[in-house]
Amino acid sequence: MTTNNTQQEVTKALELVQVYPTKKEAAEAMGLSVHAFGRRLRKAKDMGLDPALAPAPITHGMEFKSTTVQYDSEGNVIQEWRRLLPEAQGLQDFVAGLVESVQGKGKTSKYKQRKDNQEDVMKEICINDAHIGRLCWGAESGRDYDLEIAKKAVLNAVDIALGNASYGKVTLVFGGDTMHADNRSARTEKSGHALDMDGRYSKIVGVTRTVMQEAILRCTKSAPEVEVVVISGNHDWHASVCLRHIVDAFFSDCENVSVDMSPAPRVCRTWGNVMMVWAHGDCVRANKWPEVVAAEFPQQWAETKYRFVHLGHIHHRKTFATQPIQAMPGVTVEFLDALCTPDSWHCEHGYVGITPATQAFTHHKEWGMIDTQTITLDRALAQ
């Protein structure tokens, strides 16, 4: 009976949307909100009842994105080409299962201060554009890259950055595009670029989760406090949100590990006289960053002397240092290297010859940045 009622309701919605000039008026005629009325129309598409489309229902687990329909001279549907994407609810259910399976399972060993102890120093490790899940064939793009290479590169880079010292704090930043693809359709959300992926999507999520968790555990051996920042990129906006929740759940019982859960596209932290801002870098022009940072984080700006913005996205290093204006100090804006190698798309469009690498920075509470490390992919893989 429920199914018949549902079919009657969506059929009624289809009839009314043809009669009334606007969806709002049609919704009012059914005694529904515009939002609820829209759900009926989407249900009609899923059930294959919309007369403007082919009568084939939408495959379970997929949702309607766009369509191209060919009609005959009398307005009848001849054929239709649909673009479907995995439905968001499916991804949410998948993540909810992962969160439940790892809740509180993270265990960190007791921190032991090392001989080279630097309590006033914070180590900032930026893993930008790792693109875990990207598949590169050396014969085509100049160098192989896959899940195992990405995993080894990230973990070894973290080890090299930490060295044998201990710090007052370690901030581990996954600066966007940690994962190569946001869903199993293997296309970027905004541009629709086809992506070369290594393995099934659930496998890539699993490897990425393992890499992040292991990297965090290694950081806990070098500092009494570890903070994790997961920035969303243009390749992994949804996946990064999910991974943030998974990692937070895993370390929920670990007092020495915190995960920044803010949905904001930019994250700011201070360490004594040092201000650090992280973002992916794909939405703000380079010359706009100083004013964006000053406007968005005025208190942190006022309380610090040394200010840095660390970005990714462009896959090579580029620095902009603002000049002092009257008595106002500036900020250094830096696009950092990508740890991944170029794929077939980048090679085809001439984005080659860039050395894959990642960066780490050492900040003193009073003296500002006292050291910068560049860890190339070659060095990380040789570790």
Image: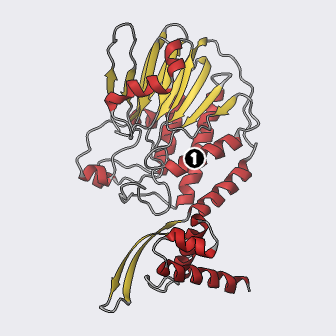
Compared across the picture, whether 161 is left or right of 70 comes to: right
Q: Secondary structure at mark 1?
A: helix
When asked about the image quadrant of residue 35, the answer is bottom right
Residue name at image x 66 percent, y 28 percent = 220
Residue 321 shown left or right of residue 5 in the figure: left
Disc 1 marks a residue whose amino acid type is Val
Residue 327 locus on image (x, y percent): 38, 7
Q: Please say whether residue 350 is visible from this viewpoint.
A: yes
Q: Is residue 29 rendered to the left or right of residue 256?
A: left
Residue 131 vs residue 25, the one in the foreground? 25
| Farthest left residue in view | 350
> Where's residue 365, x and y in %?
55, 11
Q: Which residue is mark 1?
A: 241
Residue 61 visible in the snapshot: no
Residue 76's place in the image compared with 290, above or below, is below
In which quarter of the view is residue 21 placed? bottom left
- Who's the residue at 43% across and 20% down the image? 372
Mark 1 packing: few (<14 Cα in 10 Å), some, or many (20+)?
some
- The residue under the point 64% across, 42% down is 247
